[in-house]
Image (spheres, helix red, strand yellow):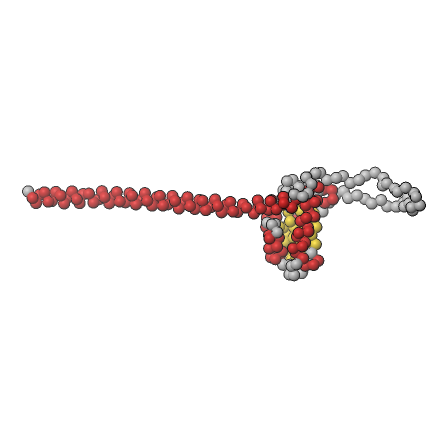
Amino acid sequence: MRRIATLTSMFARSSRRPQLALVTTALACMALGACGTEKTNAVGEQTQRADAVGGQPDAAFTAMLHKIAQSCPPSAPPEAPPSGPAKTLPSDGVETPPSDAIEPIAPTAGPEVELNARDWCASNLHEQRITQALRNLLEPTPTKVRAILNDLGYVDERIHDLKRSGATTRFFLDLRDKGGRLCVEGLAAGEETVVDKCVAPATGPFTPGERKQ
C-alpha cells in the first residue's frame, strides 16, 4: 500500500510540471508582449519628436521673416505710377525746359509696381543683412554661401539656383509670405557682392528662370 501511495504522489507531482511549464511560458509571452509594446511606443514617441524637430526650420524661417518686416508698413497694393502732365516751376528767372524735352516714363512692371509696401520695405532689410554677411567671404563657393544663408535663417527649401560662375556664386531666395511676391537675387563676390530684389510668381513653385524683374 505504501508503494502504491508513493507512486500516486510521484505521478501527481509529474503531472503538475507540464501545467507549471505552460503557466511559465504564458507569463513569459505576456512579458515579452508588454516589452514589445513599450518599445513600439518609445519608437513612436521618438518619431513624433523627430517630426516635430523637422518642422521647426519652416516655423523659424517664418518667424525670421516676420521679425525683419515688423518695422515695415502693413501690406498694401502697389501704388500706381503717376500720370498726367509734369508740373513746371514758375518762371522767376528760372530757365524753363524746352517744349520738346523728353518726359521720364514711369515703370509699368518690375519690383517698383509689383511689390506691395511691406515687401518693398522688407526687401531693403534683407538686402542689407545678406550683403553685409557675404562681403566678408573671401572665397564665395556655393557651399560657403549656403552656410552663411543658413546662419542668417534662410532655409534650403527657399534657396534656389545656387551656382558658381568663375569666382562668384549666384543664388535666389524665395521670400514670399502672406500673399507677397518678394524674392531676392544675389551675386556673392566678396567686396563686390550685389543683392537686389525681384518679383516671384504670385502662386505656385518658385522657378528662377520664370521670375519677374
Question: Residue at 68% across / 43% down in the picture?
Answer: 72
Q: Residue at x 42, y 46 (%)?
A: 42
Asked whether 6 or 117 is in front, the reply is 117
Measured as percent of width and height from the top left, residue 196 is found at: 70, 50
Q: The N terminus is located in which quarter? A: top left
Check the image and report above or below for 165 versus 175: below
Report which quarter residue 189 is drawn in. bottom right
Image side of residue 13 versus residue 153, left or right: left
**Residue 91 seen anywhere in this rendered image of the structure:** yes
Is residue 201 visible in the rendered structure shown here? no
Residue reaching furthest left? 1
Q: Who's the residue at 56% across and 47% down the image?
A: 57
Residue 90 left/right relative to 50:
right
Q: Position of residue 83 (x, y in %)?
A: 81, 39
The location of residue 88, given as percent across then percent down, is 88, 42
Using the rendered view, name the quadrant where residue 192 is placed.
Answer: bottom right
Residue at 81% in and 44% down: 105
Circle count: 0
In this rendering, the answer to whether 191 lies above or below 117 is below
List the single residue furthest toward the right.
Answer: 93
Q: Position of residue 163 (x, y in %)?
A: 64, 55
Report which quarter residue 17 is drawn in.
top left
Which one is in front, 173 or 209? 173
